[in-house]
Amino acid sequence: MRSMFREPGRVPWLLVLACLLLTVAGLAGLLRADELYGRTQLVERQLIWLMLALPVMCLVAWIPWRLLRLWSYPAYGASLLLLQVTLFMPPINGARRWIPLGLFDLQASEPARLAFIMALAAWLMHRSSQTTVRGLLMPALLTLLPMLLIIREPDLDTALLFVPVLGCMLYAAGTRLSHLSAAGLLVLISLPLLWQQMSAEQRSRIVSVMVQQDGGTAPTGDGFHLHQSKQVLALGGLQGSWLRPQSLVDDPAAWQLPASRTDFIFVMIGERFGLAGCGLVLLLYAVLIWSGFGIAASAQEPWARLTAVGITTLIGVQVVLNTAMTVGLLPITGTPLPLCSYGGSSLLSTYAAIGLLVNIRVHGTWEATAIRFDAISV
């Protein structure tokens, strides 16, 4: 058994460094939010979560992935059980998403996504049936079970993250592109039905993107979040407020931004470090995603390859959704920015996923020059 401690050269240090720098950027955003909106204990708590997340990453990276593969279905079953337990918890802000565990609250949907990726990879690893329409039924079932439980919380934004992960993993497993295109067409056709199932708040978020306007007074309702997001982001300018300690804004209302430490942490980073800081953060995410897909492409074992594809896709989709909503390209969602947004469940789950990527690179059989997935049928 190879160990990352015996062969440190096999560790993807660039990937690990990018993750650590992104977490540091998130901490800087939390500090800036404290300066603007009042002192909290969230920076200290996030540091504690980081001190717990790093050993979790190392532990997951150390255990050979072939052993972790055996736990794929049990982990998936346990995640479904946790999601069911969540539905019986007392609501917080109108939603049942957390399980109180004394010192902290567990958001069950976070580890559920990683367990889903592992289980789906285990199902697809030795099967060619996913190249037929009938063979897609079981992957669809594995996806729908956690999605429906998460929708009942309700948390539609998190539930929809399963869809692109499923699509990319099926593509990497050899599913016919024509079948995926047909499935995508069905999703488009079902959008009116999805619109009917949305709450008034969710519909308002979509409408606010379509009718947004820059400048002027801040609108009320959901349009306020988007207006303030762009307003605060613009205040950072090119270089950010850290080069000008004295604020140039006389009206404190111009700084107001709900969820500045979670959903809009990217705005806090942009205000603090400007457009240059935003570009650096996006570059770090590009390094992370490139490294993740590189690990997937060079892995020879199907489960390892598919798991790496799923993890990288999940992180990449979250980054796109979060950053795009802050500038009005997409509706505002509750999708956190991985490794940056405040939240213990998210940080632990993401670092566990990164640890699994490191594990696949360290312990897996790989080809240094192979940049390919399985052959894709059209």
Image (cartoon, grey):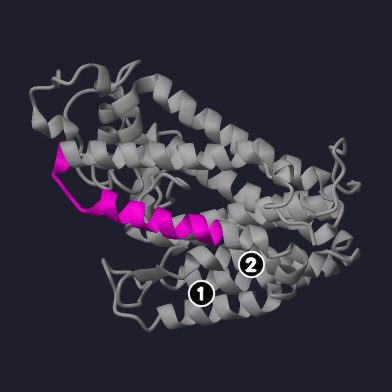
**Which residues are the magenta region?**
36-57
**Residue 164 located left or right of residue 320:** right
**Outermost residue, front side:** 6
Q: Badges 1 and 2: C-beta atoms under 8 Å apart? A: no
Could you tell me which secondary element the residue under label 2 belongs to?
helix
Please give the label number shown on residue 149: 1
Please state the horizontal and vertical placement of residue 50, each as a whole percent of the image: 41, 53
**Residue 271 located left or right of residue 24:** left
Q: Which of marks 2 and 1 precedes in the sequence?
A: 2
- Residue drawn at 40 percent across, 70 percent down: 106
Up-down relation of residue 85 to residue 166 (above or below): below
Pick the front one: 221 or 265: 265
Amino acid carrying mark 2 in the image: Phe
Quadrant for residue 337, please give it. Answer: top left
Amino acid carrying mark 1 in the image: Leu
- Residue drawn at 69 percent across, 77 percent down: 73
Whole-number angstrom distance, CA of label 1 to CA of label 2: 13 Å
- Residue drawn at 30 percent across, 72 percent down: 103
Q: How many marks?
A: 2
Please give the label number shown on residue 116: 2
Could you tell me which secondary element the residue under label 1 belongs to?
helix
Q: Residues within 10 Å of mark 2 (few under 14, many from 20)?
A: many
Please state the horizontal and vertical placement of residue 86, each as a whole percent of the image: 41, 78
Q: Quadrant of the N terminus?
A: bottom right
- Residue drawn at 39 percent across, 53 percent down: 334
Quadrant for residue 29, please give it. Answer: top left
Up-down relation of residue 231 to residue 45 (above or below): above
**Residue 138 located left or right of residue 175:** left
The answer to whether residue 72 is magenta is no
